[in-house]
Image (cartoon, rainbow, N blue to C red):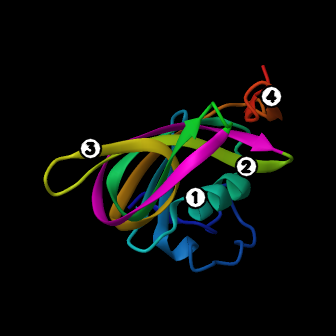
């Protein structure tokens, strides 16, 4: 097929990067405008995405996904005290929507995403996506930008916002 495991060299001969446990749960291929990824059961979403972004040297972009996750941490930013309320959702959920962007904070990749999850009773829950574990699969599209995207501290909100 067209899939590659992380560490396989897609540009030609060369030494593949050493595989990690997270890499074994990731398949991807380059497509026009970016990458298609498939995360497999057990992959930690943010660790796997950030590792992929670093290895592929993605300067910035957008990310969208669907799938099924478990043990998900979502948040809600409460402006009145400038902090996130954070809640864990144990159990398995359909990942109905995952939308976000890729930027850098202090030289490290930062995926800012929001997610909507659905449970067995078809009830939705949504918020800022902190992290989660793939329960079945997570199918991701990353659209890449050629220019690096960075975030800077914003005094009014206390957040790191896109520097535009």
Range of magenta residues: 83-105
Residue 143 visible? The answer is: no
Relative image position of residue 29 (x, y in whole percent): 50, 53
Q: Earlier in the sequence, mark 1 or mark 3?
A: 1
Determine whether, in the image, residue 156 is placed left or right of residue 42.
Answer: right
| Mark in the foreground, 1 or 3 | 3
Callout count: 4
| Mark in the foreground, 4 or 2 | 4
- Mark 2, residue position: 109
- Mark 1, residue position: 46
Marks 1/4: CA distance? 23 Å
- Mark 3, residue position: 124
Relative image position of residue 99 (x, y in whole percent): 47, 37
Relative image position of residue 108 (x, y in whole percent): 79, 51
Residue 134 visible? The answer is: yes
Marks 4/2: CA distance? 18 Å
Label number found at residue 147: none
Q: Earlier in the sequence, mark 3 or mark 2?
A: 2
- Mark 4, residue position: 154
Sort mark 2 into few (<14), some (14-19) or many (20+) by Cα contacts within 10 Å.
Answer: many
Q: Tag 1, which secondary structure? A: helix
Q: Earlier in the sequence, mark 4 or mark 2?
A: 2
Question: Mark 4 touching mark 2, by CB under 8 A?
Answer: no
Marks 4/3: CA distance? 31 Å
Q: Tag 3, which secondary structure? A: strand
Q: Residue pushed farthest left?
A: 121
Q: Which of the 4 image quadrants contains residue 137?
A: bottom left
| Mark in the foreground, 1 or 4 | 4
The image quadrant where one finds the N terminus is bottom left
Q: Choose between 95 and 64: the one closer to the eye.
A: 95
Q: Which of the 4 image quadrants contains residue 22?
A: bottom right
């Amino acid at each position: 097929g067209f899939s590659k495991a992380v560490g396989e060299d897609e540009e030609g001969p060369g030494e593949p990067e050493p595989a990690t446990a997270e890499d074994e749960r990731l398949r991807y291929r380059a497509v026009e405008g970016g990458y298609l990824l498939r995360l497999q059961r057990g992959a930690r979403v943010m660790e796997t995405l950030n590792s992929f972004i670093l290895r592929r040297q993605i300067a910035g972009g957008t990310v969208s996904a669907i799938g099924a996750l478990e043990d998900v941490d979502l948040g809600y930013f409460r402006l009145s005290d400038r902090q996130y309320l954070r809640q864990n959702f144990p159990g398995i959920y359909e990942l109905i929507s995952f939308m976000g962007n890729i930027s850098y904070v202090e030289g490290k990749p930062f995926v800012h995403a929001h997610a909507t999850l659905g449970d067995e009773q078809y009830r939705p829950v949504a918020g800022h996506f902190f992290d989660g574990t793939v329960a079945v699969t997570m199918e991701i599209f990353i659209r890449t930008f050629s220019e690096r995207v960075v975030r800077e501290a914003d005094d009014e909100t206390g957040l790191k916002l896109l520097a535009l």
